[in-house]
Image (cartoon, rainbow, N blue to C red):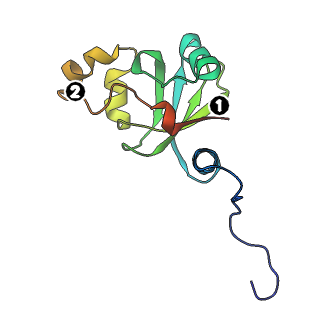
Amino acid sequence: IAAGEEIGTLLYASEGPVAARKQWLSAHLQVRGRLTLDAGAAKVLREAGKSLLPVGVTAVEGEFARGEVVACLNAEGKEIARGLVNYSAGETRKIMRQSSDKIEQLLGYVDEPELIHRDNLVLV
């Protein structure tokens, strides 16, 4: 730093808290897994800004815990979003392709009805 070397991460103060959080989610956290989405889920994320529900997930890659970042891929394998997941990889495999009202039946509990809440999701 004393030598004028540019290091670190720059977040501009002019951004609101939501924009800064979205930048943090999209670029500064390590992706721990991947979720492949059906066409309907991909469209809802892109066009309506909705949360990701388990019913829209067709495949799970990697091992991740609740609260870690996962990449959301469309059916062609292109990354369309990143987000903080509400369930682990193992739990996600059990509830994928299922409606949210079946989570308790499948897992024995419900943390959240969404796999990724829209507040914890950013389009890329």
The crowding category of the residue bearing disc 2, from other C-alpha atoms within 10 Å (few below 14, some 14 to 19, many at least 20), is: few
Name of the residue lying farthest toward the bottom: 2
How many marks are shown on the rendered structure? 2
Q: Quadrant of the N terminus?
A: bottom right
Q: Are marks 1 and 2 in contact (CB under 8 Å)?
A: no
Tell whether 88 sits left or right of 57. left
Callout 1 amino acid: Glu
What percent of the width, then of the height, locates residue 34? 52, 34
Q: Secondary structure at mark 1?
A: strand
Callout 2 amino acid: Leu
Q: Is residue 16 above or below residue 71?
A: below
**Residue 77 seen in render:** yes
Which residue was labeled with disc 1?
79
Name of the residue lying farthest toward the right: 4
Which residue was labeled with disc 2?
107
Q: Earlier in the sequence, mark 1 or mark 2?
A: 1
Q: Nearer the viewer, residue 9 or 57?
A: 9
Residue at 44% over, 46% down: 68
Residue at 27% over, 33% down: 111
Tell whether 35 sits left or right of 14. left
Q: Quadrant of the C terminus?
A: top right
Tell whether 87 sits left or right of 77. left
Q: Which of the 4 image quarters holds residue 39?
A: top right
